[in-house]
Each structure stands twice: as structure tokens, then as C-alpha cells.
């Protein structure tokens, strides 16, 4: 913005200088040099004006580029709800509650959970959703899926692309700590009739942009990277039944979903869409 203002100031100066030169040259040619010098000065004045006009056109095109010249994809931002200073404070709060907390690891965790949860929702796999959600949220989603079943409908979620995941808030509770993130994404999202494939709402060809506020909770005494019981080596994937070796975040080699290693790890307690964040 400062550079643009500097350019505008320079441009105004050039235009004012040109106007002054024009006025001076005309006065000189009329009062001192006669008609011949007037014609000569008028020629140079016109040349200067044309040069300034060309400069003005080039400058304005550079300052305000045409939308047609912009790249096809511009990553969307969510209005800087969490500034750098605020994010630093959130991380500071979280590390005070959990000395092993790592922002990037948590962001990766939240991103994977969201993608797997949306896929499980679309496929109506409550066994997978149970692994990520607390009892209240699971009950709410179970009722919604039951509604779709009763009406012979499916909410299809496909081609999910997570764009940003930012820390939003940190709260210390008596029994549990709470962390919220703001997630922006794009996806295919529509509802269809299960038997006829007829689209009831949405568009199976058009991507939509969405923002979600996701809230995670965990018992106060649990620390990051300290949740895995080393006596347990493998667990069964609730999605496909494949045996999965445990780690803090374990990925099933058969179906690709990630399996929570410990039920006391972060669990999703709320997820809601945010309009115009």
C-alpha cells in the first residue's frame, strides 16, 4: 500500500510539472518568441503529454491488474481471525498445560481427523466416527444419519481439500482441557437418493468452500506423545478390520484411515460450520 501511495504521489507530481511547463511554454511563445516558437513549443508539449499518458496507462495497469491476468486459483484466507501474536499466546497457553504440545503435530492430527470423519459421514460408518467423537457429538451425528436412512438419502462428501488449519482458542477446564481450531476447506457436497442416484440438493460437479470450527477435548493429566500403552502392539481397524500397529497416530495400510492409539487422546467434542469468518 505504501508503494502504491508513493507511485501516486510521483505521478501527481509529474502531471503538475507537465501542466506548469505547458503553461510556461505557451506564455513564452506568445509573448516573446512569436508564432514560430509557439508552434515548436506546442509540438514538444504535445509530445510530453502523450508520454505522460502512456506512462499513466502502464502505471494503472500495473497498479490495478485485470482479473483475467490473475491465476485461476487463489488460496482463500479467513480474515486473519488469529494473528501471529494471538497464535503465539495460544501456543504459550497450551504448552503451559502440556509441555510436550507441538502445534504442527496437532494441526496434522486435526486435518487427518477431519478428512476421515467426513468420509465416514458420507459412508455412514458410525464405527469409524465413534473413534474420533465424544458421546454427545456421536449421538447427534447418529440421529442425523438415521434421518438420512429413514428417507433413503445419502450426504455425499468427496474430493476434500483442506486449505488452512489455525489454532483458535485454548481453555483449561477442571477435568479436561479444550483446544479449538478454525479449518477452511473445499469439497464436493450434495445429497442424493440412495436408490435412484437423483441429486436432491447441492451439485455433484461443483466444489464448495467451507469453514469449520472444531473443538477437541482431552483429560487434563494426559500429555502429548505420552498416550500409548506399550503393552498394546496392534489393534483392529474399525473401518476394514485390518490389524494396525500402534503409534500416537497410526494409519491403516489397508484403507488409509488413521486410528487413534488411545481413547484418552484428543477427541472431537464439537464441529460446526462458520459463515463469513
Image (cartoon, rainbow, N blue to C red):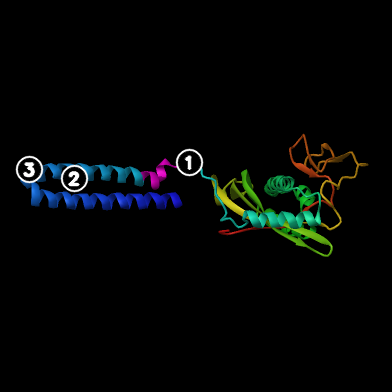
Residue drawn at x 51%, y 42% is: 73
Image coordinates for residue 96, horizontal then vertical, percent: 79, 56
Image coordinates for residue 208, horizontal then vertical, percent: 55, 49
Residue 6 circle label: none
Mark 2 lies on residue: 45
Q: Mark 3 or mark 1, which is nearer the start of the sequence?
A: 3
- Residue 276 seen in this snapshot: yes
**Which residues make up the magenta segment?**
61-72
- Residue 180 seen in this snapshot: no
Q: Mark 3 or mark 2, which is nearer the start of the sequence?
A: 3
Q: Is residue 62 above or below residue 222?
A: above
Mark 3 lies on residue: 36
Q: Secondary structure at mark 1?
A: loop
Residue closest to the eye, 32 or 264: 32
Q: Secondary structure at mark 2?
A: helix
Residue 72 circle label: 1
Q: Mark 1 or mark 2, which is nearer the start of the sequence?
A: 2
Q: Is residue 246 above or below residue 30?
A: above
Residue closest to the eye, 87 or 48: 48
Amino acid at each position: 500500500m505504501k508503494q502504491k501511495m508513493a507511485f501516486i504521489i510521483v505521478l501527481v507530481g509529474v502531471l503538475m510539472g507537465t501542466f506548469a511547463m505547458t503553461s510556461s511554454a505557451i506564455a513564452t511563445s506568445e509573448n516573446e518568441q512569436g508564432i514560430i516558437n509557439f508552434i515548436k513549443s506546442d509540438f514538444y508539449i504535445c509530445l510530453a503529454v502523450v508520454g505522460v499518458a502512456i506512462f499513466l496507462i502502464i502505471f494503472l495497469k500495473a497498479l490495478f491488474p485485470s482479473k483475467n491476468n490473475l491465476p485461476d486459483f487463489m488460496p482463500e484466507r479467513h480474515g486473519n481471525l488469529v494473528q501471529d501474536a494471538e497464535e503465539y499466546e495460544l501456543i504459550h497457553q497450551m504448552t503451559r498445560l502440556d509441555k510436550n504440545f507441538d502445534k504442527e503435530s496437532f494441526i496434522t492430527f486435526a486435518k487427518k481427523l477431519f478428512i476421515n470423519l467426513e468420509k465416514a459421514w458420507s459412508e455412514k460408518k458410525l464405527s469409524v466416527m465413534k473413534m474420533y467423537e465424544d458421546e454427545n457429538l456421536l449421538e447427534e451425528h447418529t440421529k442425523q444419519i438415521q434421518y438420512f436412512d429413514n428417507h433413503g438419502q445419502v450426504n455425499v462428501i468427496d474430493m476434500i481439500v483442506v486449505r488452512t488449519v489455525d489454532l483458535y482458542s485454548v481453555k483449561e477446564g477442571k477435568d479436561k482441557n479444550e483446544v479449538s481450531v478454525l479449518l477452511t476447506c473445499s469439497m464436493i457436497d450434495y445429497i442424493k437418493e440412495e436408490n435412484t442416484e437423483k441429486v436432491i440438493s447441492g451439485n455433484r460437479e461443483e466444489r464448495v468452500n467451507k469453514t469449520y470450527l472444531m473443538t477437541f477435548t482431552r483429560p487434563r493429566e494426559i500429555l502429548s506423545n505420552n498416550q500409548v500403552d506399550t503393552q498394546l502392539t496392534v489393534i483392529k481397524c474399525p473401518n476394514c478390520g485390518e490389524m494396525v500397529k500402534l503409534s500416537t497416530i497410526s494409519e491403516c495400510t489397508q484403507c488409509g484411515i488413521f486410528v487413534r492409539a488411545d481413547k484418552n487422546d484428543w477427541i472431537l467434542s464439537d464441529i460446526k460450520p462458520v459463515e463469513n469468518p
